[in-house]
Image: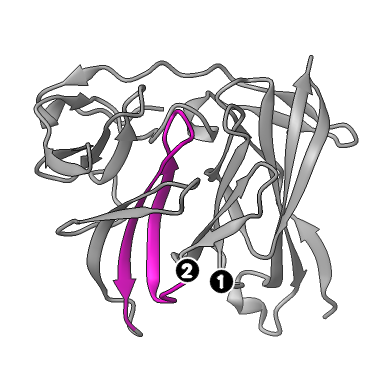
Amino acid sequence: MIWKETNLQPEISPSEINDVALLLEVHYDEKDPWNPLNGTTDKKNYFTKADLVEIRSGASKILKTWKIPSWALAESAFYHKGENTAFILHGKDDEYGTLKQRLTVYPGDKPAFSYPATPENLVIFQASPSPNGKLVALITAESDANWEFTEFQLRILDPNSGKVTSLPLSFWTALPVYGVRWATDSGSLYVRTPDRVYQWKDGKLTDAKSFPNCFTRPTNFGKLAYSDSFVEGRDPYQIKLGKKLPDPKFISRLEDIQTCK
């Protein structure tokens, strides 16, 4: 039973301009389990190679590379070309795919920083940058030793100043009836719950009279903002970006919200 390094298929997260994208490739060590009835392999030592790539007629040129000391998923990784900033929500340890996550911001030539630094029991359900790349919306909670959640909050992070504004939420969970969506002009954020939609604007959270008909895509760039993209080969990668998906329509009835793909 020998450990060997392997990796997942690279995934693409396009920026707001489709000539630049993040390419994420998760690496880990793997071996067969002692008990074959486990049905899966043993895995450890996760890390993610995040390449900022310039796309030219399908081929790509690597502009910058970050090595993240855990797993990261393309759905939660964003690069904004206008702000020259990457936002990557990633794991804290070797437990792949859990809510033990931390957001790391890579602001151009400035030093990277992670959020939260403390407390360790803060859980991030979702991290979504605004379309202009100047703010990040986070849905958070605090967890205990039994993974029971309390203190649900909407947090708005300003990466330039480090300022965080927090507003309480009654509950949150990873179900489709919960979600966030930025307005195209970045002036508002819409927060969906099962029985109402809130609007964050000017630092306040109020009931929204109208809201987007789709919360599947939280912002207008990143993996979920495009139809399927593909990557093949390496040195250089051959990348084919999907089409950017249209902005949502605005509606006034909860029952008209759709699951958009």
Mark 1 touching mark 2, by CB under 8 A? yes
Residue 245 falls inside the magenta stretch: no
Counting from the top left corner in percent of width and height, residue 103 is at 51, 57
Q: What is the residue that sits farthest to the right in this orientation?
A: 235
The answer to whether residue 220 is above or below residue 11 is: above
Report the residue at 58% width, 58% height from top. Answer: 113
Q: Secondary structure at mark 1?
A: loop
10 Å crowding of disc 1: few (<14), some (14-19), many (20+)? some
Q: Quadrant of residue 172?
A: bottom left
Report the residue at 75% width, 23% height from top. Answer: 55
Residue 249's disc is none
Residue kind at label 1, given as amino acid type: Glu
Relative horizontal placement of residue 110, taking residue 58 as reference (left or right): left
> Which residues fall within the magenta stretch?
117-144
The answer to whether residue 81 is above or below residue 179 is: above
Residue kind at label 2, given as amino acid type: Lys
Considering the image in quadrants, where does the C terminus appear? top left
Relative horizontal placement of residue 257, taking residue 81 as reference (left or right): left
